[in-house]
């Protein structure tokens, strides 16, 4: 196989490609949550989505989607590689990487099952040629009956598309490279194409089909704001992606899972049948308790289990809570009651409509009392902020909770919004009294507040903003002028995005909601701009700059203000916050934002007309695009930093702005700048033209004429200093420097030649010292060393060796290391042997050898040149460039304290099917437990592979394997390549003493005469391991190696355990664990669903704890599951356990039958809970 691409940290990547990747990953999460199905796989529920699977041994690693058959739990996988832009050509290195990864996984049975799993390249829009011919080839492979028929169809000119043969040769070319240069057979190619899929996703395009379908899926659960739920899914996926996480439904945030709870389908009686049975409606305006009811509207909701809530509502209503409760109970039972009660929470429903009906009963005194109450409740600081950021998630456990319930606080905030948005209903109050109350309430709550009140009200700020928009903007503007500014501290609470929280979201949503009104748009944009100037940045997606871009997005504006007013807002922002405005303008250029989930919309103010349609005409869009592009050129002026950024968007500028930018760049003002100042401009121009030349056949590529114009400007600005002219050649992205035509090998040769020419020129001008300085200035100094290594000049060797072997500068290390490697590669080992090392230190010799490939040639010279000091080599050598038999090297690595490197070698030997010495493998794994050597990227995967190898070897030392399984137990949970601690489980099932020892490690004795000791760090670790082993234990006592179950051995084991645990005081917990593992007991030979020996033990008069364990184990064995709102799965389980109970009772095990019936009853109750929960959404 060809060399695989390196494992990457998913959080280290960025750009459009990874924006697209996150949205593709999120689409599968949305399908999992909504009950949808994955493409190319059976229509089974999505059970698991692994992100960045490289760490688990996958090469096709962007996402691994697992689906599960609900009937037999069979799983199948889709291995997905996501590329925003790609071309099916021999020159396209990205396509080569995809084929390399796909071929590697296709031939790795540990990660891929042929005939069941599939591999998919998920991409944005392809060229028409690639799309048509690529899909035709894959469809032919899947629909033809044989490889001969497939190739016959491809070769028939009148049947196949004209480019199909060419595209097939491209695939064969890249598969040959992935196969180590060996040709892939026709049968292998045919099989691979049968498993490979090309999926086109138009995500990133707001009008795209995929996003529309995803919104449709989500809208089945959240009709009002499917875009907001989609945005939440994307944010969640981006967080998990950073940690290469595995997403299952039960591990997602609770609010996201709840958003996809299925509402129960309610059948409604036909209108024609209602009249005979229709209940009389209540005239609430004339109800005897209407005055109390209208006051309750302002409160909105309360929790009768909360003492502070009860006091608040009693105070506001002016009567005791018992008296109010009696009235509320009567109102609750009226036919069309405006009150609801569930789990102790009272709510007023249809508040706006009821307010319009009853608002006239409100008097000035009522409003003054409500304002005082609202200020008291909403000014309360959240005690959770007294805790460190990483402990706030457990605030309730620490007793740090608000006095009033969240429902009351939300209801009161909404009460202020009702007053501010529907003041006319208070017809018997003083003129403007209702609006004044809202304004004064907002001012008293937030004026001069520090960060804690703002954070405490985070979720309520959008509602408070609607209560009094002008007053709300006043207090925000004043807060921004405070020293210290409260929003600085509020931003700081975000932390790293894992333990911290985002407490600015509510403020942003509040401002977004106000921006819908034309009168507030300019003011809101300026406030958001100032907020953005305080924003230090972070991992959360909700940011002031993002809100600005969302509000003003040309193709989907989130405001009712006309285009002219939006332009005023941007110009005003440019005057007051020019840097923020510059970033905003760039974001608003065409093609920058191709998807949007929209902004927060007002809930109480009738800002958005019901018949409003979010359509933008073509003329409006072009008007905005032209305006923002022109403003960008004007704002850039002759600022080289801004011009460099704007050059990257050359292809998004409409003609007038495009022409003006070319004129600015070609002007003497720029060309006469000192070379150092104009260098960034030239570099961006070079990158831009190179990208469009390299992808000339892409739909987005500019035609020749404008590219030629830009290239002429670039020529005028090109540097003359070779340090500046050639620096870009030594980046870490070779593919950016390739041309599209020709094979990648040819392009690499051309690039190497350009690099050699560059280094030759620098060497002639400034000597070796100049080359070293140049290497220190580039991204990839190793490439400088690679080029320098082609130059046969003794001065170079004498300067670099041995002096630079002692350097601590990383760039100098990379330079000399690659120079040494290249010289040996060209001249062989004779070059190494010919170097005069007479005055070198052992350390320098060790460094020198460590720069060479990890092969026997280097090992022999380490022994010959260093003798007893050869540790200088083995402690430094890099094991990546290796071939041949690595066994000798493994021994040396272990000997010199490098067990992790040894494990890495053993893992590659295992992958290459080289013979592995069992004893050597055991030594490496055991040595790795105590080594301080840094671990390797693939080490976890290699360790699992090696343990599985040892488990299959009869000659392995059982004590050594026991220690290894115990030490690496966290990796043997069945989820990492299916590895389990087979020896430990077998020992538990056959050795009563070992089982009892595990119990004693975890649990204290029940005997009073055996006081417990204070646990040490080591004892805690051992207890945790024992608990992990017992939790995953699935091998029942009495099981034999031939998988038979022996009743007599089971009974002997059980009796010994009882004797030992009675003596130690651990009998109860031991029996519980035994009951849990007996859920895996096999059926009896006579047909009973459980072996009679196990049933007899479970039925024993004194086996209540064991039966409890069986009950618990059965419940836990269900694991994560899809919640069916009909309760059908739970009822099926109930029926199944009733049948099992009947069977064991008829077999004489009546006590055990009681437990099974209890299980059945519990599943019935769970079914009822599921149905009721679904009906409440």
Image (tube, helix red, strand yellow):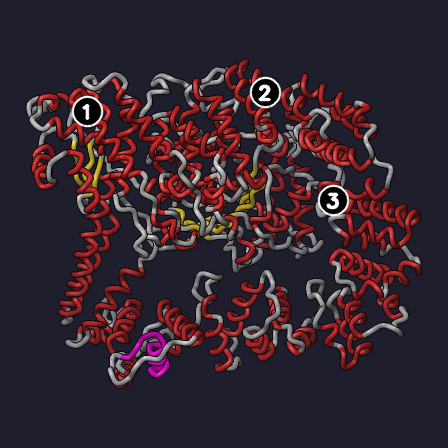
How far from the left and from the top, in percent, is residue 913? 62, 67
User: Is 1054 on the left-hand or right-hand side of 756?
Assistant: left
Q: Quadrant of residue 163?
A: top right
- Which numbered disc flags the more N-terminal residue, 2 or 1? 1
- Which numbered disc flags the more N-terminal residue, 1 or 3? 1
* Label 1 packing within 10 angstroms: few (<14), some (14-19), many (20+): some
Distance from disc 3 to disc 2, alpha carbons, whole Å, reads: 38 Å
Q: Which residue is mark 3?
A: 744
Callout 2 touching callout 1 (CB < 8 Å): no
Is 1001 one of the magenta-colored residues? Answer: yes
**Residue drawn at point x = 68 percent, y = 41 percent:** 92
Secondary structure, magenta segment, majority class: helix
Distance from disc 2 to disc 1, alpha carbons, whole Å, reads: 46 Å
- Which numbered disc flags the more N-terminal residue, 3 or 2? 2
Secondary element at tag 3:
helix
Query: Quick check: can you spot residue 1051?
Result: no
Please tell me whether mark 3 or mark 2 is closer to you in this view. Answer: 2
Badge number at residue 354:
1
Callout 1 touching callout 3 (CB < 8 Å): no
1032 vs 779, nearest the viewer = 779
Please tell me whether mark 1 or mark 3 is closer to you in this view. Answer: 1
Query: Quick check: can you spot residue 868?
Result: yes
768 vs 1068, nearest the viewer = 768
User: Is 542 on the left-hand or right-hand side of 583?
Assistant: left
767 vs 32, nearest the viewer = 767
Q: Which residue is mark 2?
A: 625
């Amino acid at each position: 196989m060809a060399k695989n691409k390196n494992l990457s940290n998913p959080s280290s990547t960025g750009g459009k490609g990874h924006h697209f990747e996150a949205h593709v990953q999120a689409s599968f999460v949305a399908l999992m949550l909504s009950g949808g199905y994955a493409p190319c796989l059976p229509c089974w529920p999505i059970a698991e989505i692994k992100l960045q699977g490289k760490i688990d041994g996958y090469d096709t690693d962007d996402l691994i989607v697992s689906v599960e058959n609900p009937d037999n739990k069979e799983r199948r996988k889709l291995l997905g590689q996501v590329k925003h832009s790609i071309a099916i050509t021999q020159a396209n290195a990205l396509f080569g990487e995809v084929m390399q990864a796909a071929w590697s996984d296709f031939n790795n049975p540990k990660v891929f099952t042929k005939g069941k799993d599939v591999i998919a390249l998920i991409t944005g829009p392809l060229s028409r040629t690639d799309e048509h011919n690529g899909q035709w080839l894959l469809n032919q492979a899947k629909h033809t009956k044989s490889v001969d028929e497939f190739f016959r169809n491809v070769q028939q000119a009148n049947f196949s598309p004209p480019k199909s043969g060419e595209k097939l040769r491209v695939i064969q070319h890249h598969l040959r490279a992935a196969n180590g240069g060996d040709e892939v057979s026709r049968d292998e190619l045919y099989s691979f194409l049968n498993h490979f899929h090309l999926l086109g996703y138009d995500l990133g395009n707001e009008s795209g089909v995929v996003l529309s379908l995803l919104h449709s899926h989500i809208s089945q659960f959240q009709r009002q704001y499917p875009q907001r739920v989609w945005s939440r899914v994307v944010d969640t996926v981006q967080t998990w992606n950073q940690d290469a996480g595995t997403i299952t439904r039960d591990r997602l945030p609770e609010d996201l899972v709840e958003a996809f709870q299925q509402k129960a389908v309610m059948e409604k009686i036909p209108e024609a049948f209602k009249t005979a049975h229709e209940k009389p409606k209540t005239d609430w305006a004339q109800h005897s308790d209407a005055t109390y009811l209208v006051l309750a509207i302002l409160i909105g909701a309360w929790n009768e289990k909360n003492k502070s809530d009860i006091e608040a509502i009693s105070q506001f209503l002016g009567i005791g809570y018992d008296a109010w409760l009696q009235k509320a109970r009567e109102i609750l039972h009226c036919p069309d009651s405006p009150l609801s009660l569930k789990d102790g929470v009272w709510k007023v429903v249809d508040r706006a409509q009821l307010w319009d009906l009853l608002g006239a009963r409100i008097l000035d005194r009522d409003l003054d009392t409500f304002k005082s109450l609202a200020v008291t409740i909403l000014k309360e600081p959240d005690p959770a902020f007294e805790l460190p950021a990483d402990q706030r998630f457990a605030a309730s456990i620490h007793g740090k909770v608000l006095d009033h319930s969240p429902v009351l606080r939300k209801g009161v905030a909404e009460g202020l919004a009702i007053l501010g948005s529907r003041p006319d209903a208070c017809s018997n109050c003083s003129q403007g009294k209702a609006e004044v109350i809202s304004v004064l309430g907002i001012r008293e709550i937030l004026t001069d507040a520090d960060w804690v009140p703002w954070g405490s009200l985070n979720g309520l700020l959008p509602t408070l903003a609607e209560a009094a928009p002008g007053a709300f903007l006043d207090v925000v503007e004043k807060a921004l002028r405070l020293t210290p500014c409260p929003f600085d501290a509020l931003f700081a609470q975000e932390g790293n995005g894992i333990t911290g929280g985002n407490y600015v979201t509510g403020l942003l949503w509040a401002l977004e909601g106000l921006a819908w009104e034309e009168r507030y748009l300019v003011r809101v944009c300026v406030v958001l701009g100032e907020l953005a100037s305080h924003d230090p940045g972070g991992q959360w997606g909700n940011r002031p700059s993002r809100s600005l871009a969302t509000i003003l997005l040309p193709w989907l504006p989130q405001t009712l203000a006309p285009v002219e007013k939006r332009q005023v807002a941007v110009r005003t922002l440019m005057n007051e916050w020019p840097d923020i405005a510059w970033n905003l303008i760039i974001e608003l250029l065409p093609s920058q934002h191709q998807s949007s989930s929209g902004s927060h919309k007002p809930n109480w103010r009738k800002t958005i007309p019901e018949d409003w349609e979010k359509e933008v005409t073509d003329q409006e869009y072009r008007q905005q695009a032209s305006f923002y592009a022109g403003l960008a050129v004007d704002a850039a002026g002759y600022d080289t930093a801004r011009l460099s950024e704007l050059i990257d968007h050359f292809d998004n500028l409409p003609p007038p702005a495009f022409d003006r930018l070319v004129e600015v760049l070609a002007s003497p003002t720029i060309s006469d700048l000192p070379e150092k100042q104009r260098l960034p401009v030239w570099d961006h121009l070079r990158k831009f033209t190179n990208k469009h030349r390299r992808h000339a056949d892409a739909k987005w590529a500019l035609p020749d004429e404008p590219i030629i114009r830009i290239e002429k400007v670039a020529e005028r600005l090109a540097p003359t200093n070779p340090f500046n002219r050639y620096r870009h050649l030594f980046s870490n992205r070779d593919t950016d420097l390739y041309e599209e035509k020709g094979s990648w090998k040819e392009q690499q040769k051309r690039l190497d030649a350009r690099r050699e020419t560059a280094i030759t020129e620098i060497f002639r001008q400034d000597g070796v010292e100049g080359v070293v300085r140049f290497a220190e200035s580039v991204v990839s100094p190793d490439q400088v060393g690679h080029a320098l290594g082609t130059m046969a000049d003794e001065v170079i060797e004498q300067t670099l060796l041995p002096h630079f072997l002692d350097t601590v500068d990383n760039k100098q290390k990379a330079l000399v290391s690659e120079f040494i490697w290249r010289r040996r590669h060209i001249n062989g080992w004779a070059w190494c042997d010919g170097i005069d090392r007479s005055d070198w230190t052992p350390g320098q010799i060790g460094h020198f050898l460590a720069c060479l490939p990890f092969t026997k040639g280097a090992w022999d010279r380490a022994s010959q040149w260093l003798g007893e000091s050869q540790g200088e080599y083995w402690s430094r050598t890099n094991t990546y460039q290796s071939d041949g038999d690595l066994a000798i090297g493994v021994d040396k690595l272990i000997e010199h304290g490098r067990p992790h490197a040894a494990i890495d070698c053993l893992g590659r030997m295992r992958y290459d099917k080289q013979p592995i010495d069992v004893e050597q493998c055991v030594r490496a794994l055991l040595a790795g437990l105590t080594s301080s050597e840094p671990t390797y990227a693939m080490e976890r995967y290699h360790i699992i592979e090696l343990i599985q190898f040892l488990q299959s070897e009869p000659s392995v030392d059982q004590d050594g394997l026991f220690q290894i399984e115990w030490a690496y137990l966290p990796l043997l949970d069945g989820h990492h390549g299916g590895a389990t601690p087979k020896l430990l489980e077998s020992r538990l099932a056959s050795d009563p003493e070992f089982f009892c020892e595990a119990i004693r490690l975890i649990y204290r004795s029940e005997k009073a005469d055996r006081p417990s000791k204070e646990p040490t760090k080591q004892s805690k670790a051992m207890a945790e391991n024992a608990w992990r082993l017992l939790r995953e234990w699935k091998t029942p006592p009495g099981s034999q190696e031939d998988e038979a179950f022996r009743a007599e051995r089971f009974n002997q084991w059980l009796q010994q355990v009882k004797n030992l645990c009675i003596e130690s005081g651990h009998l109860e917990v031991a029996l519980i664990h035994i009951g849990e593992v007996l859920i895996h007991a096999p059926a009896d030979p006579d047909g009973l669903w459980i072996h009679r020996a196990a049933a007899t033990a479970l039925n024993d008069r004194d086996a209540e704890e064991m039966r409890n364990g069986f009950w618990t184990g059965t419940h836990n064995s269900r694991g994560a599951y899809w919640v069916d709102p009909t309760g059908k799965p739970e009822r099926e389980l109930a029926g199944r356990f009733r049948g099992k109970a009947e069977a064991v009772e008829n077999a004489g095990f009546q006590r055990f039958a009681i437990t099974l019936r209890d299980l059945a009853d519990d599943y019935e109750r769970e079914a009822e809970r599921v149905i009721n929960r679904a009906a409440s959404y």
